[in-house]
Image: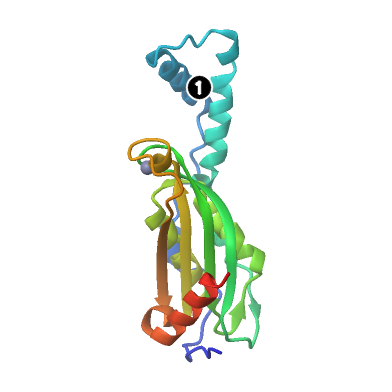
Amino acid sequence: MIKALPSAPRTTARPASAEAQSPQKTQPVDLPTIERAVRDILTAVGEDPNRPGLLDTPRRVAKMYAEMFAGLHQAPERHLDVSFPETYDEMVLVRDITFNSMCEHHLLPFTGVAHVAYLPSGRVTGLSKLARVVEEVARRPQVQERMTQTIADMIQDRLQSSGVAVVVEAEHSCMSLRGIRKAGSLTITSALRGVFKDDPATRSEVMSLINHR
Ligand SMILES: [Zn+2]
């Protein structure tokens, strides 16, 4: 099993930089503007937005976008503010955290699972908190590469752990429904920090645990 490397004394205080990285949290989702835009799109594709079946569609789509992009108005790292002193210093891995996100290039969903591992150095967080971070980061328009890095950096900043590994596997509907139309293809991204990046044995241990089915 893995032993974490010794690390510097840590504090639970928020690093100022993490706050600066958070997106604007004051601007609410403007539902009427989305509704107008959806009506315009329906008209532009040759539909009649006034036919009965479409009357409520702009309102539904506006609510859907508010939900899918709720993470823009949240600071997912806040879930990691509460951590507990613990002498356990070996790997913690939460595997197969399901998520739904939205590709920023096409505004089409990409869905899949995230695997999140960290090496505690004196403090652990609740396991469900890792899933909450994934859930909220996912609800933003983005690319999978950046989502993977954002999750890893939030955990590293807040828990000051010896290492963090995040692997994301997703199917992109912009690849399966349109364009090249390759259904079933999986995109895998990883972000490694600390010991997971620097020590090949630790890295191969987390990768084998993630890939073990
Ligand atoms: Zn796309």
Q: What element carries label 1?
A: helix
Residue for point 50% across, 53% down: 137
The structure's colour scheme is: rainbow
| Image-quadrant location for residue 175 | top left
In the displayed structure, would residue 91 be above or below residue 62? Answer: below
| Whether residue 82 is visible | yes
Q: Nearer the viewer, residue 71 or 27?
A: 71
Q: Residue 195, position in %: x, y?
A: 43, 83
Q: Residue 19, position in %: x, y?
A: 46, 60
| Whether residue 161 is visible | no
| Image-quadrant location for residue 107 | top left
For the C terminus, the image quarter is bottom right
Residue for point 38% across, 56% down: 146
Mark 1, residue position:
35
Residue for point 41% across, 19% down: 41
Q: Residue 161, position in %: x, y?
A: 51, 78
Residue for point 43% across, 79% down: 196
Mark 1 close to ligand 1, CB under 8 Å: no
Q: Which of 187 and 131 is in front in this view?
A: 187
Q: Residue 130, position in %: x, y?
A: 59, 64
Would residue 94 appear left or right of 211 to someone viewing this image? right
The quarter of the picture showing ligand 1: top left
Residue type at mark 1 is Glu
In the displayed structure, would residue 160 be above or below residue 136? Answer: below
Crowding near the residue tagged with mark 1, few <14, some 14–19, many ≥20 C-alpha atoms within 10 Å: some
Q: Nearer the viewer, residue 109 or 32?
A: 109
